[in-house]
Amino acid sequence: MADETTTTPVEKTTKAPTVPASRVDRSIPTTRVTTEDTAGGKTTIADGVVAKVAGIAAREVSGVYALGGGGARAFGAIRDAINATDLGQGVKVEVGETQAAADITIVVEYPAPIQEVASNVRNAVAGAITRLVGLEVVEVNVDVNDVHIPGDDSDDQTESRVA
């Protein structure tokens, strides 16, 4: 018979590195903070922040009457009445580590050229997200939900007064 030898693995004992109680190294006391030094760390930007930036940029485009679909606009009117405007209304974003994509629903003012307004919204939103948030914009989809005719406002107000 062959001589079978079994060996047990040898456990190595290692000493855990000493971890300071604070995440900030306080070994060298300083009395002043200099702006020339950069600190390491991570910045996280919430999707809502990117949506708000996109919403503000889209609202600034000439020919955009409002953002969002009918229900969102109705709910937005209530928020506006109590000074709680949602600047991200009508905007959906997907945010990655370095890239973002946005879907924006708009209402165009009559007689503004719809394709031109949509293109201007696309450019304004992409530019604002890149400039203010620092993310590469891979796409901006614009959904034109309605066309606002200037006479519609007076009709809506008259109907609400009669009711």
Image (cartoon, rainbow, N blue to C red):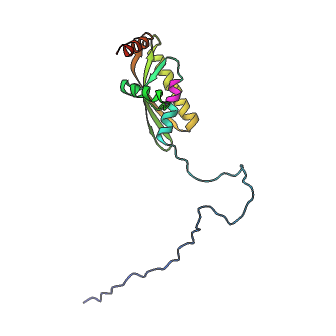
Q: Residue at x 48, y 32 (%)?
A: 84
Which quadrant does the N terminus fall into?
bottom left
Q: What stretch is highlighted in magenta?
A: 55-59
Residue shown at 50% from the left, 37% from the top = 50
Compare residues 14 and 105 and report the one nearer the observer: 105
Magenta stretch secondary structure, dominant: helix
Which residue is most to the left?
1
Instruction: Report x, y in % for residue 66.
Output: 45, 22
Q: Does 41 appear in magenta?
A: no
Q: Where is residue 154 in the image (x, y as percent from the top left)?
A: 43, 11
| Image x and y of residue 93, in percent | 44, 36
Q: Which residue is drawn at 33% across and 85% down?
A: 6
User: Can residue 82 be seen by looking at this rendering?
Assistant: yes
**Mark count:** 0
Tell me residue 8's x, y (percent): 37, 83
Residue pushed farthest right?
31
Q: Nearer the viewer, residue 60 or 11?
A: 60
Q: Is residue 104 visible?
A: no
